[in-house]
Structure formats: C-alpha cells, structure tokens
Image (cartoon, helix red, strand yellow):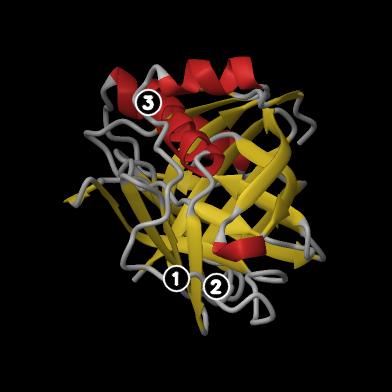
Amino acid sequence: MDMRTRLLTPTLVALLALAGCAQGGTTPANQAPPAPNGPTPAGKTFTATSATDKGTPHALVTGSTVTLGFPEADRLTANAGCNTIGGTVSFSGGTLQPGELSLTEMACDAPLHDQDKWLAGFLEAKPTWRLDGDKLTLTSAETELVLTVPKNADLAGPKWTVDSLLTGESAASTPATATASLTFTADTVAIETGCNSGSAPYTVEGTTLKFEPPILTKMACTPETTELETAIVAALTQSTTFTIEAQSLTLTAGEKGLRLHATK
C-alpha cells in the first residue's frame, strides 16, 4: 500500500510530547549497558510483550501489536498498530539512538493515534537497550518496553482476530462491542464478522489469496457490526494480497484491507 511519509522533526517530536509520550533518556543507575562489541538487535524483528510507565503497567490498545524491526545494522522500523516509523539507528554505548526518522501518514482513530505518539516519543528518548537471546528490553527514565522475537505464524491454523480496518491511507479499530475473525484451513476460511458467520473457499497463488464469494448467515446487525461485516467481505476478493510478519496478518484488496493478529 503506497502511503505518504513525513520526517519526525524536532517540531513534530514536540507535538508528540504534548500527549505525554516523551520520556527522558537518562540511563537507570542499576542498568549496565551491553558490551560495545556484543551482539545487537540488528537483523531481528521484535514484538512487545509488556510495557510499563513509571513502574505501572502500560496497557496497549486492545488487539494491537507493537513491533520493532532492525532489518540492517543501522536501520529501524517500528509500528504501534497504525503508522510505521522508519529511519537510521545506532546501538552505540548501550543506547538506542535513532537518526532521522520518517512517519507514514495514515489517519488513525484516537486510541491508535495516541499509541503511535507514545511509541515515537519513547524512541526519541533514546532508551537504553539490553539483549538477552531473543528478548530485547528498552528502558528510558520513565518507560520500559520488553519485546521478543516471535515466529511467523502460518496462514492456516491460527484464529486471526481482526484488529484494524484499512481504507486507503486510514486505519480504524474494530468496534469494542464486536469481535471478528478469520480461520483458514487448507482450502476454506471460516468467517466471523462480529454478527454473522459463514465461510468461503480460497486458493493461494504466491502472496495472493483468491476467495470465492462468502456465504454468511443473515442475522440483523447493528450499524457498527454491519460496517465491520462490510469491511471484512470487501477484503475477501479474487485478488487479495496477504503478508504475515510474526503474529500479524495484513490483507489488502485495492483500497480496502484488514490487519489481524493470531490467537489460539
């Protein structure tokens, strides 16, 4: 999906801080930085497992996933459920030091927008980092974020719960009153729209899914669940692109799409 980006300039970072997301970048006295020549997070993608602010648990937006990726020794990508941050990074001195960063400009609903700001401010605070195998701990003066390297989920098998509805360059959370999901077998997807349920045959060709028209029950739905159901059906086409990163699945069909996460 082609999305515009903007630089995280000092002015933008200041605006992000208005939401209370910026943390000081001092190193906690009881935390020693890793050895300068030791392993770094480069080459790995991490998913957040817990976060705290001032020692209090920081709840992530329900259904969202916070990821940090380091595809090269000096590159960073980050996503908190809506927009993607990207740019250069250094790990020197035991501190994660972003360089010039850019931010995609998808429109997000308020909870995801605030979470974007929280993550951007945390990264700009230049937190210290500690790598223990596949566990990465980032710590600023106020916030600690713990992440691990998850395995990529298979398309078939997990129950994929819908997190966000994508429309062009915007993303919106699903209604709090409804849970929607897709569960793939070898050739059929079971569909729960938050109101109706059903299934559709599908085939895979590379990174494209070809869905037959879904057959769903015909229960009357609330306006919110009707909108959710419409978005799900619109994403299940004869030419739906899919990508899986860790436990996250993205389906894209033209301007419409879904972001989902794997659950048991």
- Dots 1 and 3: beta carbons under 8 Å? no
Residue that numbered label 1 is attached to: 158
- Residue 84: name its quadrant: top right
Q: Which amino acid does label 2 sit on?
A: Ala
Left or right: 76, with 66 as reference point: right
Q: Would you call the spot at circle 1 few (<14 residues within 10 Å), some (14-19), or many (20 or more)?
A: some
Q: Nearer the viewer, residue 81 or 53?
A: 53
Q: Nearer the viewer, mark 2 or mark 3?
A: 2
Q: Nearer the viewer, mark 1 or mark 3?
A: 1
Q: Which of marks 2 and 3 is nearer the N terminus?
A: 2
Asked if one can make out residue 169 in the rendered structure from this viewpoint, the answer is: yes
- Local secondary structure at mark 3: helix
Label number found at residue 241: none
- Dots 2 and 1: beta carbons under 8 Å? yes
Q: Which of marks 1 and 3 is nearer the N terminus?
A: 1
- Local secondary structure at mark 1: loop
Label number found at residue 226: 3
Q: Earlier in the sequence, mark 2 or mark 1?
A: 2
Q: Say which residue appears at 62% left-offset and 24% top-offset.
A: 106
- Residue 41 in the image: above or below residue 21: below
Q: Residue furthest left?
A: 56
- Residue 206 in the image: above or below residue 212: below
Q: How many labels does the image show?
A: 3
What is the C-alpha distance between the residues marked 2 and 1? 8 Å
Residue that numbered label 2 is attached to: 153
